[in-house]
Image (cartoon, rainbow, N blue to C red):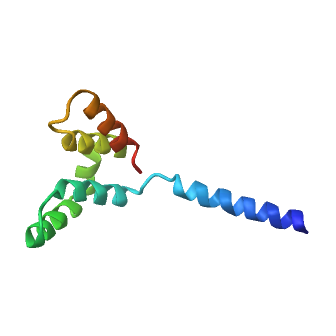
Amino acid sequence: MKQLAITMVLGLAALGAHAADKEPTAQQSKMGTCNKEAGDKKGDERKAFMKECLSAKPAAAAASGTPQQQKMKTCNAEAKGKTGDERKAFMKECLSAK
């Protein structure tokens, strides 16, 4: 009985770890990309931008590339002005972020 309980706990822990490793859904990825592209916009300007960005047709989102390509594009935009080791470290951190 004790062994069964231990096995169940380990199984649930593995399921939890697996769920944390899942790739974001297309909508989650789109939200992240739009949020980063919104940058320093505030108030009504940000609301309008987010509405437009998030309501873009799926075909347009698919044309912009895979989630990894979108992530690379976003990180490149954020890395503007950085060079050498600073840029390399930033890109490594940005691209490895979940």
**Which residue is painted at 80% across and 60% down in the image?**
7
91 vs 38, nearest the viewer: 91
Residue found farthest to the left: 45
**Is residue 64 visible to us here?**
no
Q: In the figure, is residue 15 to the left or right of 59?
A: right
Q: Is residue 4 left or right of residue 11?
A: right
Q: Quadrant of residue 53?
A: bottom left
Q: Position of residue 59 (x, y in %)?
A: 26, 51
Name the residue rendered at 33%, 35% in the picture.
Answer: 89
Q: Quadrant of residue 84?
A: top left
Q: Pinpoint residue 51: horizontal percent, then vertical percent.
A: 18, 67
Q: Position of residue 36 (x, y in %)?
A: 23, 54
The outermost residue toward the right is 1
- Residue 18 vertical position relative to residue 83 in the rendered view, above or below: below
Figure quadrant of the N terminus: bottom right
Asked whether 81 or 1 is in front, the reply is 81
Q: Nearer the viewer, residue 58 or 41?
A: 41
Outermost residue toward the top? 84
The residue located at (26%, 53%) in the rendering is 33
Picture mark count: 0
